[in-house]
Amino acid sequence: MSYLITGGAGYIGSHVVRALRQAGETVVVLDDLTTGVRARVPEDVPLVVGSTLDRALLDATLAEHSITDVVHLAAKKQVGESVEMPLHYYRENVHGLQTLLEAMAAGGVPRFVFSSSAAVYGMPDVDLVTEDTPCVPINPYGETKLVGEWMARAAGKAHGISTACLRYFNVAGAATPELADTGVFNIVPMVFERLTQGAAPRIFGDDYDTPDGTCIRDYIHVADLADAHVAAARSLAEPGPVRDLTLNIGRGEGVSVREMVDLIAEITGHQGVVPEVTPRRAGDPARVVAAADRITKELGWQARHDVRDMITSAWAGWQHHRPEARQG
Ligand SMILES: NC(=O)c1ccc[n+]([C@@H]2O[C@H](COP(=O)([O-])OP(=O)(O)OC[C@H]3O[C@@H](n4cnc5c(N)ncnc54)[C@H](O)[C@@H]3O)[C@@H](O)[C@H]2O)c1
């Protein structure tokens, strides 16, 4: 099998590249390097620099490397930015995906794994979010992921492409310090940044209807997430009819923001720091925790790393990329 990984120079994509190679697979990366980093792609992995919007480039890449499997991670992912620039998000995430699926259909590529997100669920009012919980995204980013799932499934059915839509919950950690997330868009790096600056970490609202009043999320180690992609791709390749999988990728375990902040403070040597509680942010649901049993049943995959592993590895990555944090 020969894999094309779009967005393979990104945070999660580079972990997927690593996991597939460790599983003995042949991999090619296509990335426009808008947020990706060339150095994340191993030197002996071909890197095609370009966009999923470039149909001619996609046709040539699929043919030249005899691609049998596409893992599509290339996308814009910032919720706030998607509210300000919805058309850009629809263009990159939806039109980019459409162009890719058209190229796959024309080139007869039989398998597709899609990076979806728990953002498709919006504000789920359930204890555990199953794959059958209604999808009601509340921002353009989540909408592009839901439209993407619809498009992938429909194109899969019509053109004989087996598909797996993987709904990631909150991704954290790093397999190696070099591959760590360098953006500051979610709780772990946001708390690192505040602590590194000598400032109190922020908690957005502690008056939610949860045991400690702060929001509850389900965190998944990026190395576990990458392994789930290998399991999904392998499963699609089993002989049989065209497949259509939709799977949550989480641990099925809720961790509150306050628990997370306390654990980060402890692991980074900032015990006793008192977080600053600010008003709620718009659009933050109280609790989003995955029902994570379908993927275990379907693929035999299960997360191996806990939240402590995620924070410890992310902190090593933070210090690697920001030398000033080492002195702090
Ligand atoms: N990080 C998370 O917590 C999270 C959660 C749920 C879903 N996801 C999804 O996972 C995927 C990867 O996210 P990430 O955190 O690694 O982000 P990232 O920004 O690090 O990676 C995205 C990669 O795609 C590339 N890219 C973007 N648009 C492109 C295009 N049109 N053509 C070619 N390359 C393009 C970027 O250069 C980058 O390397 C995204 O689809 C994202 O929506 C991420």
Image (cartoon, rainbow, N blue to C red):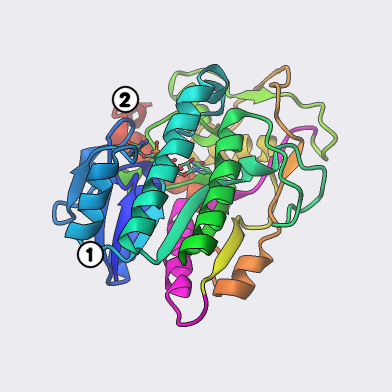
Is residue 245 visible in this depiction of the protein?
yes
Give neighbour class at mark 2: few <14, some 14-19, many 20+ (Cα, 10 Å).
Answer: few
Indicate the quadrant of ligand 1 in the picture.
top left
Q: Using the numbered discs, state the Cα–Cα distance from disc 2 to disc 1 in whole angstroms.
A: 45 Å
Q: Is residue 222 magenta?
A: yes
Quadrant that contains the C terminus: top left
Comparing 162 with 107, the one in front is 107
Horizontally, residue 282 falls left or right of residue 112, namely: right
Give neighbour class at mark 1: few <14, some 14-19, many 20+ (Cα, 10 Å).
Answer: some
Q: Residue furthest left?
A: 44
Name the spot of residue 59 as percent of width and height, x first.
25, 51
The part of the chain drawn in magenta is 213-241
Which residue in the structure is indicated by mark 1?
A: 66
Q: Inspect the image, locate mark 2, and give the three-letter code of the amino acid beneath it.
A: Glu
Q: Is residue 105 magenta?
A: no
| Residue beneath the point at 68% across and 57% down | 252
Name the spot of residue 202 as percent of width and height, x first.
61, 22
Name the spot of residue 137 as percent of width and height, x first.
68, 36
Which residue in the structure is indicated by mark 2?
A: 324
Comparing 4 with 90, the one in front is 90
Comparing 161 with 300, the one in front is 161
Q: Inspect the image, locate mark 1, and give the three-letter code of the amino acid beneath it.
A: Ser
